[in-house]
Image: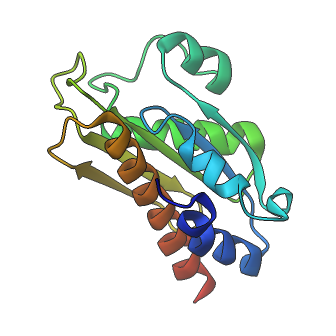
Amino acid sequence: MPDLSEMARGAADALFASGATVAVSESSSGGLVAAALLSIPNASRYFQGGAVVYTHRSRAGLLCLDETLPAGMRASTEGYAILCAEAARERLGTTWSVAETGAAGPSGNRYGDPAGHSCIAVCGPVPRAATIETRSANREANMWVFARATLELLRQCVAEHGGK
C-alpha cells in the first residue's frame, strides 16, 4: 500500500508555497485523494473539504448539481470531471479544486467504460483535465493509480502557476 503522505507531498508542498486552498470531489478513488492531502501535517492551511461523489444523489446533495447534466455530457468523462471540480471550487470558495470520476473495477461502468478508466480535472488558475486507462480490473490498485494521478496533476498545475 502506498504511503499517503508521500503520495501527496508534491501537491501539498506546492499548495503550502503558494498559500492556496483546495477542494476535492472524487468517486472511484473513494476518498484516497482527500485522505492523502489530509495526511500532511498542517493540512488545514490548504485543505478546505472534500466529498466522495459516488451517485447521482450525492452529486446533487454534495455539489448541488441536479440529476440533469448538460446536453451530451455523461459521467466518467473529462467534461464531467471539470463540472464536478468547478462545483466543488465554487461551493468551498477555494483557489483550486480537483475531481476524479471513473470505473475502478472489477468491471466497467454503466456508460461502457472499462475497469481502470478514470477522468480527472483540476480547476483553478491553470486548469487541466486528463484521462487515465490502466487496463486493469484490480479495483484497489486502480483506486491508488487514480488518486496518485489526480494529486500529480494538481501538483503540476499549482507549480506551473507558481512559476509565473
Percent position of residue 81, x then y: 42, 40
Q: Quadrant of the C terminus?
A: bottom right
Q: Residue at x 79, y 73 (%)?
A: 19
Query: For residue 116, what is the image quadrant?
Result: top left
Using the image as rendered, state which of residue 93 and residue 16 is in the foreground: 16
Query: For residue 135, what is the image quadrant?
Result: top left
Q: Residue at x 60, y 36 (%)?
A: 87
Residue 164 makes an appearance in the image: no
Q: Compared to 110, does 35 lie above or below?
A: below
Q: Residue at x 31, y 24 (%)?
A: 74
Percent position of residue 42, x then y: 85, 64
Looking at the image, which residue sits at the far front?
1
Q: Is residue 127 left or right of residue 135?
A: right
Q: Compared to 157, does 48 lie above or below?
A: above
Looking at the image, which residue sits at the far bottom?
163
Percent position of residue 15, x then y: 69, 71
